[in-house]
Amino acid sequence: MTNLVLLGPPGCGKGTQSKILVDTKQYFQVSTGDLLRKSVNSGSKQGIAVKKIMEKGELVPDSMVIEMLLDVIKKHKKKSFIFDGFPRNINQAEQLEKSFNKNKTKINFVIFINVNLDILEERIKKRIEESDQNNVREDDNINTLLKRVEIYKEMTLPLLDYYKRKDLLWEIDGMQPIDVVSKNIKEIIAN
Ligand code: AMP
């Protein structure tokens, strides 16, 4: 069993790469974003609260995300997991590690898909300028994306150092074509 964490900013291709690994390497993908969207679509009280947070581009409280994640891990014991969008901060990383330690398992690889944040932000800002000012929803989405990048820098980037110190961190140039990034990931997990 090999457990893998994919790290990187919104839009770097974590989801795409996870799906390739699920199809070709029999990993079980755990996307906290997907789990939260399911909760939103259920229309439950919790889902309504989550929707508001996601729309603002902020992080959903750790307690809620961690509970959802541990529940999935428990249900799919003995699988190789690929974590897509989790952890998003140090506390989440520590909680995941604690749970794995209890079950005598561990994270084997943390792969950072590095994309140029300036280019990402520039792209988003350009889209703001070009968007129809009457189309409020489009602006909201773009603002959400900018907020997500900001939160990524503040909360998620410190994870690079955290995992580097644990000797788990690998870095890939995420500006390359999808198939090259995928090949790079497969080379790393073959180690
Ligand atoms: P994603 O699909 O991973 O891009 O996530 C979409 C949104 O879901 C994020 O902007 C957050 O609001 C929320 N979210 C996803 N994963 C997490 C997480 N691990 N911790 C907190 N919020 C999360």
Image (cartoon, rainbow, N blue to C red):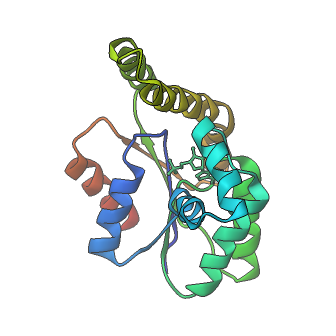
Compare residues 125 and 153 and report the one nearer the observer.
125
Quadrant containing the C terminus is: bottom left
Compare residues 153 and 166 and report the one nearer the observer.
153
Relative to 53, is 11 on the left or the right? left
Residue 128 visible:
yes
Residue drawn at x 41%, y 23% is: 135
- The percent position of residue 107, horizontal first and vertical second, equals 59, 67
Q: Is residue 181 above or below residue 72?
A: above
- The percent position of residue 144, horizontal first and vertical second, equals 54, 32
Residue drawn at x 45%, y 26% is: 117
Relative to 16, is 117 on the left or the right? right
Residue drawn at x 65%, y 59% is: 47
Q: Is residue 48 above or below residue 119?
A: below
Residue drawn at x 41%, y 18% is: 134
Looking at the image, the residue that sits furthest to the front is 134
| Count of residue discs | 0
- The percent position of residue 7, horizontal first and vertical second, equals 51, 48
Residue 191 visible:
no
Q: Is residue 11 above or below residue 182?
A: above
Compare residues 22 and 102 and report the one nearer the observer.
22
- The percent position of residue 35, horizontal first and vertical second, equals 56, 65
